Image (cartoon, rainbow, N blue to C red):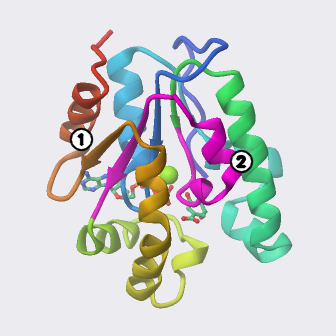
Amino acid sequence: MDAPEPTGRRAHGGPPAVVLVGPPGAGKTTVGRVLADRLGLAYRDTDADIELAAGKPIAEIFIDEGEPHFRDLERAAVRAALEGHGGVLSLGGGAVMDDGVRALLAGLPVAFLDVGLHDAVRRVGLDAPRPLLAVNPRQRWRELMDVRRPLYTEVARAVVATDDRTPQDVAAAVLDALQLKDA
Ligand SMILES: Nc1ncnc2c1ncn2[C@@H]1O[C@H](COP(=O)(O)OP(=O)(O)OP(=O)(O)O)[C@@H](O)[C@H]1O
Ligand SMILES: O=C(O)C1=C[C@@H](O)[C@@H](O)[C@H](O)C1
Ligand SMILES: [Mg+2]
């Protein structure tokens, strides 16, 4: 599970300063933490919120209750996070598939972290298991992106390429694209 939220940073009601979307391996969690540091704001991740509430990792929620149940939890988690958080928010990779989630994102400073197959597969091989990519990750990732790329693009105010860039460089590009300044 993700590490707990660092304390002492500003989190307040109202919409987030930045919302990150993108596929597994785009770097939403990694870049989100860098952005929160730079902006002096709290960081929140709907995947971590769901795991905390369920008391188990997402991979186990998929196994025990199935993906449709996870998507219900995710819609509720996104709604709650958008209502009560003024910091940097990362959404789970599949959250944009839900019409209700996309409607909630309208007008918000959403950045789509884009990534190509090569870098994505290399990155997701590095850490926690992703249930949707457990079998044949290259083909599954391609299939996911065919469906999701138009949805990420639809909700995004900025599209930021991440291939061959460090998380710090990506964070700087997000700030630039959304015209935000460091704390
Ligand atoms: N720009 C980058 N360059 C190199 N490695 C990166 C970059 N961004 C993230 N990573 C690494 O890739 C892995 C996946 O990153 P991360 O967990 O941030 O992705 P994510 O978009 O949050 O994925 P998920 O949708 O599964 O939550 C991590 O090991 C992270 O350290
Ligand atoms: O791409 C997806 O559908 C997912 C991405 C992760 O962030 C988690 O939300 C979960 O593993 C599903
Ligand atoms: Mg993540």
Q: Is residue 49 above or below residue 134?
A: above
| Residue at figure coordinates x 29%, y 61% from the top left | 115
What SS does tag 1 mark? helix
- Residue marked by disc 1: 170
- Residue marked by disc 2: 100
| Residue at figure coordinates x 47%, y 83% from the top left | 140
What SS does tag 2 mark? helix
110 within the magenta span? yes
Residue 107 in the image: state x and y as whole percent: 52, 29
Q: What is the three-letter code of the residue carrying label 2?
A: Gly
- Residue numbers of the magenta segment: 90-115
Q: What is the three-letter code of the residue carrying label 1?
A: Val
Residue 14 in the image: state x and y as whole percent: 63, 15
Instruction: Report, in whole angstroms, how far the alpha carbon at label 2 lies from the one at label 1.
Output: 28 Å
Would residue 159 be found to the left or right of residue 87 on screen? left
**In this view of the protein, can residue 179 be seen by the observer?**
yes
- Residue 79 versus residue 102: which sits nearer the camera? 102
Q: Quadrant of the C terminus?
A: top left
